[in-house]
Amino acid sequence: MNNSKLFKDTTLIPLKALSETTLDNSLHPLSGKLKAFLQSQENTTGFISTGLKKDDYLKVIEAQVRAMLKYQNKEGRLIDPVEKTEKYYSTPCFAHAVSALVASGAIEKDNPLAISGMKALDASLTDMVNATVNGNHGDFYTWPVMLAYRLFKTNASKEQVNSWDEKLKSINIEKLYAFYNQEKNLNWILVHASGEYLRAKEGFTTVDYAERMIKYQLSNFTDLGMYDEPGNPLAYDLFARHYLAGMLQLDYKGQHYSILKHNLWKGAWTSLFVQSPFGELPTGYRSSHHIWNEAEQSVLFEIYASAYAKAGLNKEAGAFKRAAMLSLSSIQNWIREDGSGYIVKNRFPIEKKHGYERYSVHTCYNMLAMSMLAQAWQFSNGAIEEYPAPADIGGAVVTAVKPFHKIFASLKGNYVEYDTSGDQKYNPTGILRVHLQDGHPQLGPSEGIAELYSGEGNVMALGPSWKDDEGNWIYLAKFKDLEPEIKIVTESDSEVTFSVSYNFEKVDNNNLKQIVETISITDKNVTITNEFKGFEGIKRLVWPMLINDGREKTAIKQTDNSVSLYLEGKGVKWSTNFSKNINLILSNEQFEHRNGISSPMFVEFKENKITYTLEAVK
């Protein structure tokens, strides 16, 4: 690591982390992998930048808010076109997104769009004062409202600013916040605490309440710097952290500054190491596959790119910048014809709500993503050049097993996410995601089949299945809480291999002793071996194939020992050299999941081991 220009006040980076000699496992559990990455980064050749710049955030934001403008009523609130009412915090996030356009000079302060943003801010503040925010979601109002206020106040009239000031002084947070003064491990509390910090920073309250709420939440951070709440959702791990990182970026130096700085720095590097080569946040429990997942990555990564640039560490800064741009690039792939986004990564009409959570709403979650991109723009240092990120280089296996039950491995653009104990509602056990360089990220697959979207009992992942004594097919995907043995076999610049072993000897009514999945990644492909121990019956492999993304059907090509899927000009091929009594079956069953409609491929065989490969094809 470059030791030059070691600033004492880099705000977000622990001083010890700026010295190579102290970058050890006591500072970060991934310190060894971090060192290896920085060494590999020095030797990378043929790296190609995304070509995206800071102003590209504004282009996405402007297209989105102009698409939403037609849904704004005369009071300034956004009325969702599907729900036919204002939903949650769409209005304050719209205000913040527009304020970034005004602050940037992309639109003039007297532009009708700018005026609509100020109306949205005024309506949001009125509802906050009256504690009449939509859906009792006041916890989510204060942060975007304060960010919008800070950007708008130099462009609004004195009378308008005075009106906003009076409202910001008059807020009763006991009535406004659904989770006022509670100690639950829930992201809502950190969201409103961050907003209260900004209210205090602007002189409208004291910082005491925010400090108390943050203190309650500190025990919910893991050794990897991740935030955990019930269900271990990966989307809300980063959701909570990006607010806190924003606080630090906006000069928080309160009583929890040191511990937050260390935890958030650890979490930033962890997020960098688990990001998909396509810029996607890993899937995991609720709210996965929403485009705001990638938007919150952009916020966090821009903050740490700027922090490292301030410290004079340009290649570290460039890695975070690269990750931010990969995240933005992912979002750009999910823009609808009117400029708004598909809020979940499928292309069904928004009226279908395919893959939505019960709380997913077109206006709200598009505007949440745009508020996040506005923050990314605010925090971005446009002078930072991209350097390779872990998503480009890989060469590592990251285990986030307790409490997130996940394994991540990648090498030179090929990537695997593995769930060691799927919750069954959202995610099965086994291989959830295989992203292949030059392939299609949703075909790999990018998600398994689970009950919330597919129906009770319908749980499948890429992985093994076997027939019990009564003739029933048993799926590894349906098991949880078996606590498998995980071995990291190889981590190098030419191969990454790990194995996951499940012991079934203590499972009732089961005639199998052990299953071992060994996963190897090279720069060419991903190779997986499934080994069945102590069982001589019929086995099969399952591959949940995405057959429809809501707009296009997947083209499928089959041979005796391979199946290739093609969508949007890109393809993924499953193949095996295994030829003994193999029976490859394309099922007619169809299951919904977040990326669209899936149909399983089954490969039946009698031997105790099968090896297969996934690779990108044209």
Image (tube, rainbow, N blue to C red):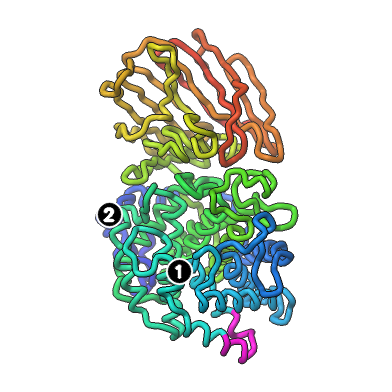
Is residue 578 found left or right of 159 in the rendered image?
Answer: left
Cα separation between marks 1 and 2: 26 Å
Residue 506 lies within the magenta run: no
Amino acid type of the residue that numbered disc 2 sits on in the rendered structure: Asp
Q: Which residues are magenta?
A: 152-163
Q: Is residue 163 above or below residue 290?
A: below
Q: How many marks?
A: 2
Q: Which mark is on residue 246?
A: 1
Q: Residue at x 37, y 45 (%)?
A: 404
The residue at the far bottom in this view is 158
Single out the mark in the foreground, 1 or 2.
Answer: 1
Q: Relative to 353, is 432 on the left or the right?
A: left
Within the magenta stretch, is there residue 158?
Answer: yes
Tell me the residue that label 2 is attached to.
24
Residue 442 % position (x, y): 59, 39
Residue at 71% x, 52% y: name it: 336
Please say whether residue 383 is visible from this viewpoint: no
Specify which label sits upstream in the sequence, 1 or 2.
Answer: 2
Quadrant of image for the N terminus: bottom left
* Residue 215 location (% of width, % of height): 30, 68
Image point (69%, 39%), residue name: 568
Occupied quadrant, residue 560: top right
Crowd around label 1: few <14 · some 14–19 · many ≥20 (10 Å): some
